[in-house]
Image (spheres, grey):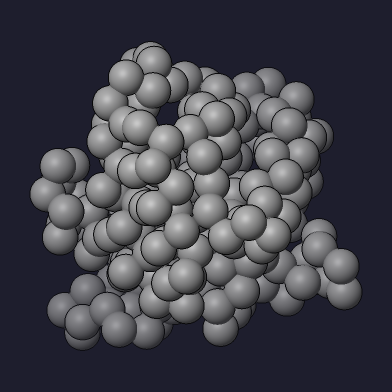
Amino acid sequence: MMKRCVANNTTPLTEPPALTLQQFSGQAAKWYQKYAHSPYFDPYIRLEQKLSQKASDEGYLELVDLADIAAWGGNQRAIKQRLLRSNNEGEVRQATLEAIQRLDKPSEAIRVVLRINQWGLTYASKTLRCVCPQNYPALDQKLRKAISKALLPTIYDGNIDSMIRGYLRFLKICREIERQVTTLGPRSGGVWFLADIEMALFQFVWDGGRLISSAYYFPGVSNDRRRATV
């Protein structure tokens, strides 16, 4: 069912192990709570509320909104300045308008946001996450490196089709974790958003954890991968 960005850098609760999806699902609430107590959580929630409401009311985002996403994400490699130099207001409005209209089709939504110059997969996915946290997580380099290649094959930045395939695969991972979580979620009514799943996963990875594959726990993985794969 369809429904960041830095984590708490304090001392880990324990040394995180390599976990399968099912095993991580059993710990998701713990890792989410740790992220929620970091200094980065409240600024994200405010940004999410602001941009998801604007997407609903206006149907598009503006350059200033993407600049806010860049600032929240740490402005890595001066992404904010490169964004502002490489795009005009009309281009950003049009791209985000089309993406918001296609939120029910993730492959199309992410493809449209990837048209924004200098934005890349990390920030394109952050954009969708802020606009529709129910159904979209963010995928950055730290997560990509910590997830087994059996779960998330190598993504080639700059190759649009590779980035889209990789992001759709990550969406499946987050949905599978959401399906298996048994504790109540942090949203109204005990719901888990995919953004919440990603926050928990990001905190786990930030503290050194790795996500590994098992066909038993993750439907769709081929039979030759039935043993856990790092």
Drawn side of residue 33 relative to residue 15, left or right = right
Residue at the front extreme? Answer: 90
Residue at the right extreme? Answer: 189
Q: Observer-nearest residue: 135 or 24?
A: 135
Q: Observer-nearest residue: 30 or 101?
A: 101
| Quadrant placement of the N terminus | bottom right
**Residue 174 shows in the view:** no
Q: Observer-nearest residue: 192 or 125?
A: 125
**Residue 62 x, y percent position in the rendering:** 52, 40
At a point 37% along the width and 84% down the height, the residue shown is 219
Residue 182 appears in which quarter of the rendering? Answer: bottom right
At a point 55% along the width and 78% down the height, the residue shown is 2
At a point 78% along the width and 35% down the height, the residue shown is 42
**Residue 152 x, y percent position in the rendering:** 28, 59
92 up-or-down from 43: above or below: below
31 up-or-down from 190: above or below: above
**Residue 133 x, y percent position in the rendering:** 62, 59
At a point 40% along the width and 63% down the height, the residue shown is 98
Q: Observer-nearest residue: 9 or 13?
A: 9
**Residue 168 x, y percent position in the rendering:** 33, 67
Drawn side of residue 69 relative to residue 211, left or right = right
